[in-house]
Amino acid sequence: MAGGTESAWTTLGKLPREEVCRNADARFVPSADSYALSCFGQEILVCPARREITSFSPISATLLNRFRYFSELSILWYLAGARDIPFSGKLIRPSDLKAGQIFTVGSHVLPLDKLARKYGDDVEGFLARGRDLCGENAGLGDASLRLLPFPRVPVIIVLWRACEEFNARTDLLFDSSCQLHLPPDIVWATAMISVLMM
């Protein structure tokens, strides 16, 4: 499991910039003394010296302010822990991850049922919101989106419309490589921001 915010800032501050940029698929902006990282297609600036995370887009403002509890730790531990490796191409459910049981109990259960209620009869709305987040069609279910909360951690959200036999449903999938970049609790937080941003 990852440590807290203080630990994440300290860890990130000790890493060589070139290593962070290569591993996280980020870049360093000298004029801002910050890493520039793409989150849902929006540029986020992370300054270890000032311990600040900023952005100038409305979508990023939602991510950094409304969902700060989840996003700050996720952003910092992604920058500190990502590796320069390709996607595996193997999609897995959160429960299939190491320590995946955290996704299935208590307050850690992802609010996928809320997404199903919101978009079960509104596929166009689902796809439109996905476009706002720079998502791409994943070719699954009745509609699906491949989101990039971080460059090396794709999250796939699959929508199944309601029918006579079943209620609407949404599923969330990861590329199995996610667990090489992030500890289990940060994988969970990354899943949570992906659902909440929708």
Image (spheres, rainbow, N blue to C red):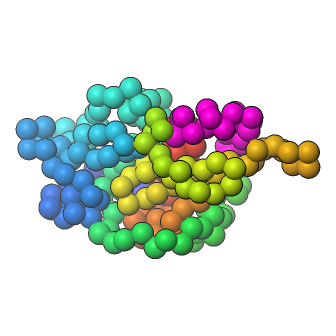
Above or below, 14 against 108 in this view is below
Q: Residue furthest left?
A: 31
Is residue 115 shown to the viewer in this render?
A: yes
Q: Position of residue 148 (x, y in %)?
A: 43, 51
134 in the magenta segment = no
Whether the magenta-drawn stretch holds residue 114 is answered as yes
Displayed quadrant of residue 2 = bottom left
Q: Position of residue 167 (x, y in %)?
A: 84, 44
**Quadrant location, the C terminus:** top right
Of residues 197 and 34, the one nearer the viewer is 197
- Outermost residue toward the right in this view: 165
Left or right of 101? Residue 134 is: left
Q: Is residue 165 above or below residue 83?
A: above
Magenta region's main secondary structure? Answer: helix
Residue at (52, 45) in percent of width and height: 194
Count how many numbered circles sit on residues in the image.
0
The range drawn in magenta is 109-130
Q: Which residue is painted at 53% across and 35% down in the image?
A: 129
- Viewer-proximal residue among 158 and 195: 158
Q: Is residue 188 visible?
A: no
Q: Above or below — where is 7 with respect to 119?
A: below
Residue at screen point 25% across, 40% down: 45
Q: Position of residue 182 (x, y in %)?
A: 43, 62
Image coords of residue 120 (percent x, y):
74, 38
Front residue of 55/124: it is: 124
- Residue depicted at x 91% and y 49%: 165
Classify residue 121 as left or right of residue 155: right
Question: Residue 29's quadrant in the figure?
Answer: top left
On screen, residue 142 versus residue 8, left or right, reads: right
